[in-house]
Amino acid sequence: MAPPPAEDLHNGEQVHTHSNCSECGKFRKCEQGDFQKCSQCLYTVYCSKSCQKKHWPVHKHICKIMGTQRKKLEAYLAENSSDENVKKGWTELIAWLKFHNTSLCNAAVAGMQLKEYPDSDMNSALFVRVHRCTDEERGDRPVEAKFCIVNIQMVNVDPDDDPMALTETLWPSRPIVVEAGKKDMGTDYRGTGFLMISFLYQFAKNVKEHEVFFPKFFNFNKNTGRGIANTEWRQALARNLDEGRQIKFCCGKVVELVGGCCCGGWTHEKPATRTPRLQ
């Protein structure tokens, strides 16, 4: 299957993240070392305990939310499902998020329409709802294609009107993320986007539905902010999520040690190593 062009979402520089230390930014592939995941959320990675400690003021708000969500999901799956793979629900959810991170962030940028609404990163968010398909529906598919789309929309951020209180809890940490972006990008910093993913689980009609929320801030530069959205960015994102596809990208970070680009962009990886799967 041919990779979707980045312009499917917007024509600016693509927001992309690699497997790198969330504090100092070192690329795992470049460093050729083992990075450690946050033991609570399993999403954020660090090159050392020192970096993890320094990054805690930025990470702690979302980590606590994700830790609570993880415990509730694991309890729900243990009670309502006998499928061993499904019981690994949090690991599966994290693998899906990491695989689709680039598409989700760039879709959020497209949805903000920064050319027309320069301050929209301060009061809008991408909201995506998906549900875990049953094995009968997609049992033969890899992790990145096991969630079916319910809806994709841009929403106004209103911490005072949030039934889950997630925005109210997380939004006060936004200035910390903004400062981290300015420190990392310097004068090239443009803004800080926000997205919320809702994961629905229900494996039988007589079983109560369970919902897991994943909120995320991300920083982007001026070249990204100058981009113009594709008018069909929602459809493009839906295809990526539904078919398990990634945007083709490369940041061009070349290191002699690895004999080429070590950005971690999937452009450089063999097809057989491109898909994250449960162990």
Image (cartoon, grey):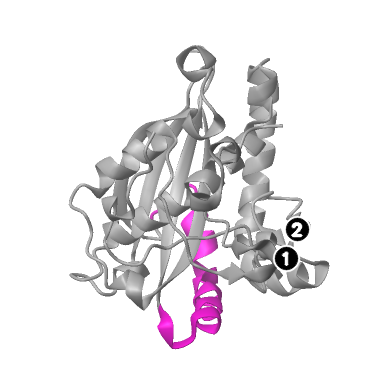
Where 195 falls versus 78 (above or below)?
Answer: below
The answer, for residue 43, to whether it is visible in the render is: yes
Identity, as a three-letter code, of the amino acid under mark 1: Glu
Q: Mark number for residue 35? A: 2
Where 138 falls versus 8 (above or below)?
Answer: above
Q: Is residue 258 left or right of residue 187?
A: right
Residue located beneath label 1 in the image:
31
Residue 233 belongs to the span the image colors magenta: no
Asked where in the image residue 7 lies, by quadrant, the reply is: bottom left
The answer, for residue 165, to whether it is visible in the render is: no
Q: Residue at x 33, y 38 (%)?
A: 238
Distance (Cα) linking label 2 and label 1: 9 Å
Q: Quadrant of the C terminus?
A: top right
Q: Residue at x 56, y 77 (%)?
A: 180
Q: Quadrant of the N terminus?
A: top left
Residue 172 belongs to the span the image colors magenta: yes
The part of the chain drawn in magenta is: 161-189
Q: Nearer the viewer, mark 2 or mark 1?
A: 1
Q: Residue at x 49, y 47 (%)?
A: 164
Asked which secondary structure carries label 1, the reply is: helix
Whether residues under marks 2 and 1 lie with C-beta atoms below 8 angstroms apart, the answer is yes
Q: Residues within 10 Å of mark 1 (few under 14, many from 20)?
A: some
Q: Nearer the viewer, residue 176 or 268?
A: 268
Q: Residue at x 59, y 63 (%)?
A: 260
Q: Residue furthest right?
A: 49
Q: Main secondary structure of the magenta part?
A: helix
Asked where in the image residue 128 lies, by quadrant, the reply is: top left
Q: Nearer the viewer, residue 106 or 130?
A: 106
* Numbered label tally: 2
Q: Is residue 47 left or right of residue 44?
A: right
Where 270 falls versus 187 (above or below)?
Answer: above
